[in-house]
Image (cartoon, rainbow, N blue to C red):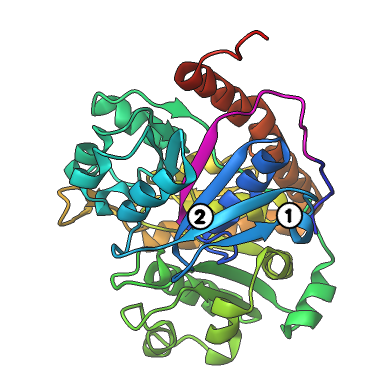
Amino acid sequence: MQKNRSIDKVKDRRLKILWSSNGLWTNSGYAVYQRDLLWRLAADGWNVAQVAFWGLTGYPITLHGEDYGFPRAKIKIYPKMSNDWGDDAMLLHGKDFGADATFCMQDVWTLDPNILRQVKCFIPYCPIDKSPTPLMVTERLRFAYKIISFSEFGYKELEKSSFASTLILEGTDPDIFKPMDRMACRKEIGLPQDIFLFGMIAANKENPPRKGFQEALEAFKKFQDVHPNSGIFFHCQQPAPTGFPIKQFAHTIGIDMNKLFFMEDYKAIYGSDSHSIVKEINAINILLHPSQTEGFGLTVAESQSCGVPVIVNNTTSMPELVIDGVTGEICDIQKVGRFTNDLSFVYPADVDSLYRKMENLYNRLQTEENKIKSDCRNHILNKYDINKQVKDKWIPLLEELQLELLGPVANK
C-alpha cells in the first residue's frame, strides 16, 4: 500500500488527459510505471483516463484510488475496441472523454498512421530500443504533437533521426521497492537459504529470446562449474508458446537442474504484483538482465532500489541505468549483431564477458555487500525516484501543455 496522498483542488488542472497502454492492474512493466505515474497525477488534480488495450474488453470501468493509497482520486478506464493495439480506441474513446491530449506508452510502430493523423494532440511516451530507430517508428512519430523519451538512449537516437523530444526518465517507487530481509523473502517464496542466487524477472515471448535467457544460462553454466552452490531463479512474466525453452536448454548444456528455480507460470501471470516481485528481488543476490533490446528496463531500476546489483548488456538503454563497477556490471556485446526485419540491429550479450562480470560482482559482494546495497539504493533515489520525477518533470510539462492548448484561466 502506498502512502496516502490527497487531491489538490486549488491548482489549475483543466487539461483532460487520455493514456493508452496496458491496463493499470496488469503488472506489465508499462502498467507498473503508469500506475505509479497516473495515480500521482490524478491525486494532483489532473483529469486522467486510460485506454487499456491490454487488460480490458467490453465496457468502461472506473478505478478508485483508495486501494492504491490515493484517496478520492479516480481514473476512468476504457476498453480496447477492434484494433489490438488501441489506436481506434485512442481516437473514439478520446472523443467520448473529451481529451485535450492523448498520450500512449507502447511501441508506436503497431499503430495505424491513418488513425494517428486524427487523434487529438497525440503524444507518445516513446520506447526506442534499437539503433538506428526503425523506419516504422519514425513514420508514426511524424503525427506526434510532442514526443517524450524515457531513456537517454532513446533521446539521442531520435536526435540522430532528426526528431526533437523531451526527456523524462522512467522511474520506480522506492516506498515499494526497498531492501528487505533476504532469508525471510526466500523462506516465503520457497527458495533455499544457503545458496548464491541469481535471478531473471522478464517476459519470455520470443525465440531468439530478446531478454537474453540463452546467454544468461550459458554464462551461468560456467559460473556453476566453479561455484556448485549457486542457483538461478526465473520469474517469466508473460510466458508464451513462442518463448524460449529455458528448462530444456539448461538440461541440454548440462546445468544442474536442482539449482534452477521457477515461479509457477499461472502465478507469474495472474498472481503477481509489485508487492510480490519486491520479495523476489530481495531474495536474490544479483539480477541478470543481459537483454538484447530495452527501451528502458524497469526491473533494473527496481532491483537497485532494493539494494540488489544488476548485470546488464552493453546495448540500448541498459548501460545508463547502472553505475558500472558500483551498482552493477556491464557486459560486452557480441561483435556481430543480428539484423532484424525492421532494418535495425540487436546485439546479444557476449557469454564469456557475462560470465566474467558474474565472477566480478560475486567477488565484490563477499566483502562489499553493504556498500553495494547502499550505492544501489542511493543511485535510484537520486535519479529514478518516481515522486521526484512527477514533481520536477511531469507536472511542469502538463502545466505548460495546458497553457499551450487551453490558454490561461480567464479573469473573472
Residue 380 seen from this side: no
In magenta stretch: residue 36: no
Residue 174 against residue 263 in the figure, above or below: above
Residue 94 against residue 202 in the figure, above or below: above
Q: Amino acid at mark 1?
A: Gly
Answer left or right for 133 relative to 287: left
Reading the image, the residue beneath label 1 is 65
Q: Measuring 15% from the left and 48% from the top, which residue is drawn there?
A: 343
Q: Nearer the viewer, residue 346 or 65?
A: 65
Q: Measuring 26% from the left and 27% from the top, which residue is drawn there?
A: 160
Residue 237 seen from this side: yes
Query: How far separated are the C-alphas under marks 2 and 1?
Result: 19 Å
Residue 190 location (% of width, % of height): 73, 86
Q: From the image, state whether disc 2 or disc 1 is nearer to you.
A: 1
Q: Which part of the image, by quadrant, shows the C terminus? A: top right
Answer left or right for 404 relative to 229: left
Q: Measuring 72% from the left and 24% from the top, which residue is drawn there?
A: 11
Q: Measuring 79% from the left and 53% from the top, which residue is drawn there?
A: 69
Residue 68 location (% of width, % of height): 74, 57
Q: Which part of the image, by quadrant, shows the N terminus? A: bottom right
What label does residue 30 carry, if any?
Answer: 2
**Based on the displayed image, in which of its 4 quarters is residue 21 positioned?**
bottom left
Range of magenta residues = 7-21
